[in-house]
Image: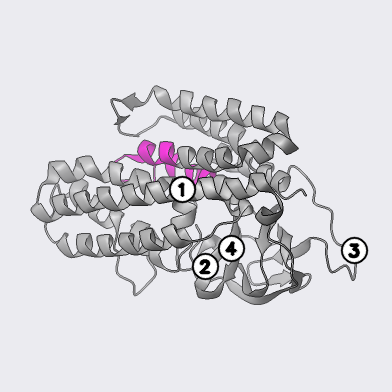
Amino acid sequence: MITIPTTRAVVVALPVLAGLLLAGCAEETPQAAPGDTTGPVAVKATDSECDLSRRDVKSGTSTFSVSNGGSKVTEFYVYAEGDRVMGEVENIGPGLKRDLIVELPTGKYHAVCKPGMVGDGIRGDLTVSGDATPHADSDAALKDATKSYQRYVNSQAVALEEKTTEFVAAVKAGDVAKAKALYPVSRTYWERIEPVAESFGDLDPKIDARVNDVEPGTEWTGYHRIEQALWEKNSTAGMAKYADQLLVDVKTVVAKAKAVQLNPLQLANGAKELLDEVATGKITGEEDRYSHTDLWDFDANVEGSQAAVQALRPALQQRDAALVTTLDTNFKAVFTALEKYRVGDGFKPYQPTEAERRELGNVVDALAEPVSKVAGVIAQK
């Protein structure tokens, strides 16, 4: 989750979380020597502190090596002006470490730890200076990757607006059956580009917050507010204003997503974030807790992750062909595991047994590990 106000519950299938965390710790990052102004930035996160080894870095690619010395699961973010997410790493359990590799142009940023994965987090300034050439400008394959992925984002954004418009119309017309049918369809396009969509200020919690995500004093709005009425009450009564607001917010996200300029590391990190989404919200079944349409979201998250990786494929092939082969194999394994839940163009309601949840967790674990390596490979000159 990328936006500051978002509060995500952390009810994680333990095998999945363990796998993701281990993936993040698989390779020890060399630490900067004392006085070094170019090596990884060590981030010591606790329940009350977010201590960076330095707060001035050079423009270009930076690595933040985040160690969680607290008692809560934490997240680390780098925010640009307006709380636009430049990079994030989630689900850092107590005692564990994960790395964030991010490309930053010259400017002023905020480095933020979020113990408990809630609220605004513990903030501090981060200054980036220098005149490094953007990574994509010096590599034709990476430049093509960003253009290719931008086209993908644009296509999904257009479909998101179209299908949400249809969903909203059904809700306002009181057509419960049609609204139920359109709910998972419209979310598919959101879930495919979720890291991009989440990166704009407070729009994500307005659109996609679950009831336990809502900050005190804030009204619950968005998809899940309407989902509750449709499935728990089998009604759209009182939902017109939420439907109207949802469409306004989605249109805002769509406009921003079409205009945003992404760099290659954002693609790589986004691919990993989408698998984190699967682990923390979809496999557990808590995301769509009323409709049980989680597998639609699950499939869309993995498709979105694959789209980002595929855009980077030529550059990855040049740098690490074996990793590309592993990624191909493990993406296929996840989609194969999903097939037995498919019904027509969608999926059966997701109310898994523990064995089913563990089986899906295992294939997502196996995919998350190589996807976690993509950013490091792409960062190579």
Crowd around label 3: few <14 · some 14–19 · many ≥20 (10 Å): few
Labels 1, 4: front one = 1
The disc labelled 4 sits on which kind of residue? Met
Image marks 3 and 2: residues in contact by CB distance under 8 Å: no
Place residue 203 in its image quadrant.
bottom left
Q: Residue at x 39, y 41 (%)?
A: 297
- Magenta segment: does it hold 76? no
Residue 84 - label: 2
Residue 33 - label: 3
The segment highlighted magenta reads: 273-300
Distance from Cα at disc 3 to Cα at disc 2: 31 Å
Q: Residue at x 73, y 61 (%)?
A: 62
Secondary structure beneath dot 3 equals loop
The residue where tag 4 is placed is: 86
The disc labelled 2 sits on which kind of residue? Arg
**Residue 104, horizontal then vertical, whole percent:** 66, 65
